Image (cartoon, grey):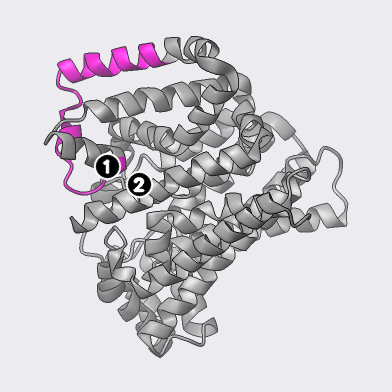
Amino acid sequence: MLLNRVNIIKIFFLIVFIFSFFVGFALKDYVPGGAITDFRDMIWPTLQSFKKDFYFSIENYGSFTDASYPLYYIINAYLNPFTSNKTEFLFSITIISFASFFLFAFLLKKNLSKIEYLDCLLVSSIILLLPFYRSSAYWGTSENFGWIFFILALYNFLKIRNYSNKPNNYEIFITICFCFFSSCALYIRPALVFFPIIYFIYMFLNNRNIYIILISAFSYLVFAIPGFILIFIWGGFYDYKNFNADLMEDYHNYKFIIRNIPILLSYFAFYFFPVLIIEYLHIGIKKFSLKYFKPFFSAILLLLFLWQFNYLNYLGEFILGGGAILKLNYLIKAENFLLLLLASAIGFSIIYQILKENFKVNVSILLPVLIIYGFPNEIYQEYVEPLILFIFLSGMLQTKYHEIYFRNINLSNLITISYVVLYLLGATYYKHF
């Protein structure tokens, strides 16, 4: 890497972003979301219970009101030496969250050999600026641990999908590693179950390597043993005897999927907005308009029709969740969601184009994500932050958006980082003012 003026500027901003991430830890009360309450009322008491009595904590896990599986607490209770003091523990989680930045940069470099490592670091530094990623890091919630295992699994997935012949020992090892890391991710954040689902759908539709599929099925069966033990102890998929609500009926149910689609589409619009700006600058207004007019017009027409017949009125009644675009819409006008409908139509247009480019590959990735993340009764933006960026930037989705983004990486970094900085400032302003 040549140390020219451009690279010096890149290094300067990279240092600023890293510095701001750790300064944020000292000022962690400013971050959005309810992580501070989760840490005080749930995470710290649960962690201390696991340190004191493992079996009691497992047997009475539902009483701690955490809907996730307990691997996060097991790892920290028995492997993290900084769990006796709250500040030390929170800083240790911040450091571990920071490690994801390097892991993702390494993944990008492995899959983008023509891109300089410094540029990969800048792309990866975007996650350090995301408000909810910061919130999870500073207040010790389990999301970022899940993302670490997700990145490790993603690294192996990007290798496995190219295996077409009978695997050698190294390829078998990579396959087992994928199954292990994706299982760990699931045991930390149950919603990450979408990754094994994606994997098998992808393998059956696109790869069809029967050897890899059988090895994966056996590996998952082995790694599912802890889950079977929990089901045996709890008498179900969660500790319903000690939990104060019906998780499957009241909080996570297939009946919420349809109503969550407009919000999920708006999330895709939100995180792809810088990519659309980059594409617009690349192809010009005429091609851009022709590309998006039909899917956008069709989607907005359907959404406005549903709105007029009162099928979307619930979008004006959110107290919790709904995402940044809906919150901005409420600030403009209370109980109004027209801006969200526009964003949903844009999100639909993006997904339509991605599916149009390579349907079999991309539907096997997007469909499980939309279904699994459509289950919650209250749908928060933090659920897909930074998931959407991970699956796009890594090249997991096979789309021209990825090629356009990395064609002029300096411009893409400038636009995306500026956008995310505005998002961080806006989220901070919304929380406090």
In the image, is residue 416 above or below residue 222? above
Q: Residues within 10 Å of mark 2 (few under 14, many from 20)?
A: some
In the image, is residue 280 above or below residue 18? above
Helix, strand or loop at label 1? It is loop
Please provide the residue range marked out in magenta: 296-324
User: Magenta segment: does it hold 310?
Assistant: yes
Query: In front here: 371 or 141?
Result: 141
The alpha-carbon separation of the residues under discs 1 and 2 comes to 7 Å
Q: How many labels does the image show?
A: 2
Image coordinates of residue 218 in percent, x first then y, are 68, 54
Name the magenta segment's main secondary structure.
helix
- Give the amino acid type for the residue marked by disc 2 in the picture: Gln
The answer to which image quadrant residue 337 occupies is top left
- Name the N-terminal-most of marks 1 and 2: 1
Q: Which residue is located at x 68 percent, y 52 percent?
A: 5
- Which residue carries the number 1 mark? 322
- Which residue carries the number 2 mark? 381
Residue 178 in view: no
Residue found at the far front of this picture: 5
Q: Which residue is located at x 63 percent, y 59 percent?
A: 11
Image coordinates of residue 294 in percent, x first then y, are 44, 9
Residue 193 in view: yes
